[in-house]
Amino acid sequence: MANGCGHPAALHTGEAPILASATVGARFWLLIEHSGPWAAYLDECRLPDKVRALIDRATALGVRPQLIRRTGRRNGSGGPLHVFAGSAAGAEPWLAEGHFDDPDDLDLDALVHGVVPESCILVSEPVFLVCTHAKRNACCARIGLPLARFLDEQLPGQVWETTHVGGDRYAANLVCLPHGLYYGSMSQAAAIAAANAYRHGEVVLDRFRGRAGIPEPSQAAEHFVRSHTGELSVGAVAVESSRSNGDTTVCIVVRNAPAGSSRFRVVVEPAVFAAPCGLACAEEISTYRLAELSLLTPALT
């Protein structure tokens, strides 16, 4: 049964599988405060020429641009351009904040080399993004806006509305930066649980879409190792290597735990979930299933 947003209700309640669906092309981030209005696509938004040029420059370098705004604010504040620039790549992700009179002064080349751009300052608190991009998909506003308001009340100063993050079928979507952790089909209770876990360096597997910037099969492999071991620490599970064999992907996944490190061989295969929406239609969702998981080395103390 559809919910009025164009997607079956199962997609927004957590009934459908959402693992391994985080945006692959998001190793580096550029968040630009712009209160709106937001068109369906960034290149259609009414933006100052230099801000549009900054977005084009970011896209060319493989940096994911997002427009952000504080909950409930729709009027421009004027003054310098406010941005966050961050790297979700590697074991030590970071996010830095800056204000620029001239957007040309933001050094995106430094960002893609893992260096904090000049005039930006590292932030010590997480930043939480909730997609509320109504012009892209009505679900994101209908479900995302109330969630953004709720989280902003609970975590003032850390929550931003944002443009399309990928996967509007999973609204409400939550992204935790700097690690780029994606959650979908979020209720208020699920969202505050995920946000609080992240503030303490952990993930919640329920409604966890994966970590952005890595291939979907790797996201799936990490998820299955976490599910198998109960390991929730954000940085404790990572794919060491992977190889494809047709549709099958074989990953070597490392788990670093206080008791020692261990390695797993994980084999994942694509699968399809048909979300029912009445007799006339069904939306097929690509996902992954676990074909094999085996311990390669015992924990080393």
Image (cartoon, rainbow, N blue to C red):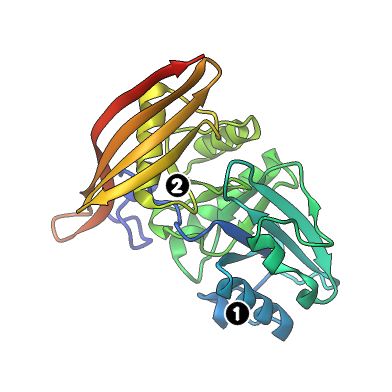
User: Looking at the image, which residue is at 23% across and 56% down?
Assistant: 284
Going from the N terminus, do you reach mark 2 or mark 1 first? 1
Residue 217 seen from this side: yes
Residue nearest the observer in this picture, 275 or 216: 216
The Cα–Cα distance between marks 2 and 1, rounded to whole angstroms, is 26 Å
Where is residue 219 shown, x and y percent of the image? 40, 44
- Mark 2 burial class by Cα count in 10 Å: few <14, some 14-19, many 20+: many
At label 2, the amino acid type is Gly
Percent coordinates x, y for residue 137 in the rendering: 45, 66
Q: Is residue 132 left or right of residue 86?
A: left
User: Residue at label 1?
Assistant: 45
Tag 1, which secondary structure?
Answer: loop
| Contact (Cβ within 8 Å) of mark 2 with mark 1 | no
Identified at 70% across, 85% down, the residue is 49
Q: What is the x, y in percent for residue 177?
A: 62, 48
Image position, residue 44 (x, y; %)? 56, 82
Q: At 70% across and 40% down in the image, what residue appears?
A: 155
User: Which residue has dot 2 on it?
Assistant: 184
